Amino acid sequence: MSIWISSDCHFGHNQSFLYGPRGFGSIEEHDAAIIKNWNEVVKPDDTVYLLGDCILNDNSHGIECMKKLNGQIFIIGGNHDSVNRVKLYKQDFDFIGYGMPIKYKKYNFFLSHYPSLCSNFDFDKPLRERVINLCGHCHTKDKFKDMDKGLCYHVELDAHDNYPVLIDDIINDIKEYLNLC
């Protein structure tokens, strides 16, 4: 079983400013490719933390897209996850709130939709004694966009070629970024 992290699927968000920069000509092409990419890497028994903004506009279509995704999906709310969308999520998925700490292989993570400061500028401590924020929201292609503010790593689809990212790869990326390899 593997642990995957992602955010900002935006299934059904029929706006070219969203799907265009991701390399698609339509929302239909976007949604089909996201589902395909996801299921290429995520196995049915894997765990996925989806950090918000899962669907937008057509809620029925968005939920149908999400039901096609492999893995046990835990959702953290984002700015587009209205009260009504959260009710829809809860029918088929595990909605766990708007932020959540997890520990994995002695590493401490804080999962949130928005970039969050949680390292307290403790740069002198070993990586396992710090808190790493995993976030989305910004639709950046730069997974290290907010590392100057602390340990803040972007997991949105935009930063990972439209794929979810494996938590072990996140740890390795951060170690490389910090020259800890």
Image (spheres, rainbow, N blue to C red):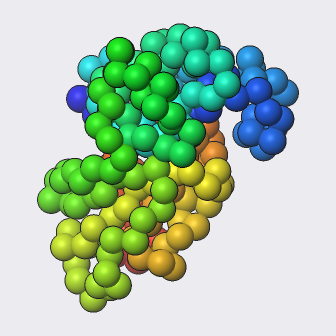
Asked whether the viewer can see residue 45, the reply is yes
> In the rendered view of the protein, which quadrant contains the C terminus?
bottom left
- Residue drawn 46% across and 31% down? 83
> In the rendered view of the protein, which quadrant contains the N terminus?
top left
- Name the side, left or right, on which 25 lies relative to 44: right
**Percent of width and height locating residue 24:** 79, 30
Q: Is residue 59 above or below residue 115?
A: above
Q: Of 56 and 32, which appears nearest the observer?
A: 56
- Name the side, left or right, on which 150 lies relative to 109: right
- Residue drawn 49% across and 44% down? 78
The single residue placed furthest to the front in the displayed view is 83
Q: Is residue 177 above or below residue 62?
A: below
Asked whether the viewer can see residue 6, the reply is no
- Residue drawn 35% across and 15% down? 91
- Name the side, left or right, on which 106 lies relative to 88: left
**Percent of width and height locating residue 151:** 39, 71
State how many labels appear: 0
- Residue drawn 52% across and 51% down? 136
The single residue placed furthest to the left in the displayed view is 106
Q: Of 116 and 42, which appears nearest the observer?
A: 116
Q: Of 62 and 141, which appears nearest the observer?
A: 62
User: Based on the displayed image, in which of its 4 quarters is residue 56 positioned?
Assistant: top right
Q: Is residue 124 above or below residue 164?
A: below
**Percent of width and height locating residue 101:** 24, 54
